[in-house]
Amino acid sequence: MTRIASAQRRTKETDIRLELNLDGSGRGDISTKIGFFDHMLDGFARHGLFDLSLRCDGDVEVDCHHSIEDTGIVLGTAIKEAVGDKKGIRRYGSCILPMDEALVLCAVDLSGRPYLVYDAKFTNQSIGGMDTQMAKEFFYALSYSAGMNLHLRVLSGENDHHIMEAMFKAFAKALDQATQYDERIVDVLSTKGSL
């Protein structure tokens, strides 16, 4: 069963169209007009083995805030739709990912209860046109629209590029793990009987 979802959002600030295939091969076709953010989303697709098609026309002449936050909302919405009723999936995923001197921990629970725990600090205000403080806004918006519990913690690192890239890749690996089917799970993985 292929799990594909489309989502879009149109406001006075952004026009976003997205298609996500959770059971893809890592193919990204991404354009947000924010070069480094495109690079991060491409890494997310590649390392999570998701196929992601994304077009974002946003007011980048103002700054990158609206485009990045709204992309988080739309991607989270697509993840929630693609996962579906969650029957048979592992629900939890985690990854400790190294990238040179950077080491990032990410843990995901597709519980239906949104929550973000975020512990990351950057030296610079921006990387390649992406404000570093927007990483938190992106993951917050994504976690709430997807209904997931998401923990991101930078364990070590000095280079902002490496830290940010490790965060997106660790998230991809954790999400891929959480969305995988396990033949031993016949319903949803919850004592409540639903998520």
Image (tube, rainbow, N blue to C red):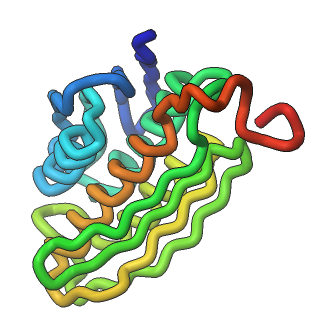
Q: Residue at x 73, y 49 (%)?
A: 113
At horizontal 20% and vertical 84% (from top left) the residue drawn is 124
Q: Determine whether 181 is above or below 189 in the image.
A: above
Left or right: 69, with 88 as reference point = left
Residue 60 higher or lower than 20, as above or below:
below
| Position in image of residue 91 (x %, y %) | 60, 42
Quadrant (top left, top right, bottom left, bottom right) of the N terminus? top left
Instruction: Work out which residue is located at the far top of the displayed protein and give it.
Output: 1
Name of the residue lying farthest toward the front: 184
For residue 70, side relative to residue 108 (left or right): left
Query: Along the line of sight, which residue is nearer the eye, 193 or 82?
Result: 193
Residue at horizontal 31 percent and vertical 65 percent from the top: 167
Q: Which residue, as the protein is rendered here, is positioned at the far right?
A: 192
Residues 77 and 165: in front is 165
The residue depicted at 29 percent of the width and 72 percent of the height is 132
| x, y percent for residue 37 | 21, 52
**Where is 87 relative to 145, above or below?**
above
Image quadrant in which you'd find residue 169: bottom left
Give the tally of numbered discs.
0
- The x and y percentages for residue 2 are 40, 12
Relative placement, left or right, of 46 versus 173 is left
Q: In this view, does 151 lie to the left or right of 52?
A: right
The x and y percentages for residue 138 are: 42, 55
Quadrant of the drawing holding the C terminus: top right
Quadrant housing residue 145: top right
